[in-house]
């Protein structure tokens, strides 16, 4: 059975931000946005929360085929990550768009924690049905879903899409 898809509008995204902001009981000294999905949510939240120290982390996991060939666990490769000196002793908010399997945000959270930061995680959407972690969930989330969320910044664009959508 195909996974249900849900296309959000910018207005709905603004509603997610409005739902999240009152949840924060801590002032964060830095934010780590996970590329690419966390860039837009992180930008919106750092503005709403007045967080000035904004950092990025890029993580890659081996494909399933690569994992089968190597017969190894899926260890993340950190392509880009802030220096520990930017994290140590700080309250840090790690942001992504969706907690699906949870492995990317968990990998980033663990590395930020290892650098000596006090870490909280935040996503727009939490999908507990896909999560690989039974005892873990994001510290902050705006909505629970079982759908594949398509944010307005991910929607197909361009001349080809316009032509395809025109009635024939």
Image (spheres, helix red, strand yellow):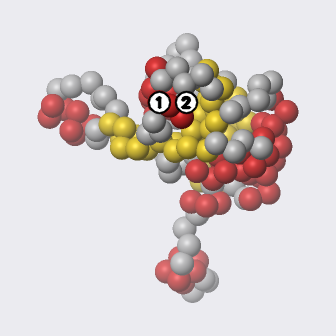
Picture layout, residue 62 above or below residue 118 = below
Residue 125 occupies which quadrant of the picture? top right
Residue 148 picture location, percent across and down: 56, 45
Q: Are marks 2 and 1 in contact (CB under 8 Å)?
A: yes
On the question of residue 130 being in view, the answer is no
Q: Residues within 10 Å of mark 2 (few under 14, many from 20)?
A: many
Q: What residue is at 40 percent from the left and 40 percent from the top? A: 59
Label 2: which residue? 87
Per the rendering, the mark at residue 56 is: none
Picture layout, residue 117 above or below residue 44 = above
Q: Residues within 10 Å of mark 1 (few under 14, many from 20)?
A: some
Horizontal side, residue 28 vs residue 160: left or right: right
Residue 93 occupies which quadrant of the picture? top right
| Residue sticking out furthest to the bottom | 168
Residue 110 picture location, percent across and down: 47, 23
Label 1: which residue? 84
Q: What residue is at 21 percent from the left and 38 percent from the top? A: 66
On the question of residue 73 being in view, the answer is yes
Q: Quadrant of the C terminus?
A: bottom right
* Numbered circles on residues, count: 2
Horizontal side, residue 105 vs residue 146: left or right: left
Residue 21 picture location, percent across and down: 81, 37
Residue 115 picture location, percent across and down: 48, 24
Task: Give the structural element (helix, strand or loop) at label 1.
Answer: helix
Picture layout, residue 48 above or below residue 27 = below
| Residue sticking out furthest to the front | 85
Task: Give the structural element (helix, strand or loop) at label 2.
Answer: loop
Towards the viewer: 90 or 58: 90
């Amino acid at each position: 059975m195909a996974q249900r898809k849900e296309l959000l509008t910018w207005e709905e995204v603004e509603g997610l931000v409005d739902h999240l902001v009152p949840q924060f009981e801590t002032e964060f000294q830095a934010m780590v946005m996970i590329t690419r999905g966390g860039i837009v949510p992180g930008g919106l939240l750092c503005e709403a929360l007045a967080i000035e120290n904004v950092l990025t982390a890029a993580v890659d996991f081996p494909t399933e085929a690569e994992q089968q060939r190597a017969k190894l666990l899926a260890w993340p490769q950190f392509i880009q990550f802030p220096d520990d000196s930017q994290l140590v002793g700080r309250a840090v908010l790690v942001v992504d768009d969706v907690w699906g399997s949870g492995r990317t945000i968990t990998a980033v959270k663990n590395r930020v924690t290892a650098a000596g930061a006090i870490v909280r995680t935040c996503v727009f959407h939490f999908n507990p049905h896909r999560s690989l972690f039974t005892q873990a969930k994001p510290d902050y989330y705006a909505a629970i879903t079982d759908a594949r969320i398509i944010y307005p910044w991910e929607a197909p664009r361009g001349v080809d899409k316009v032509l395809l959508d025109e009635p024939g």
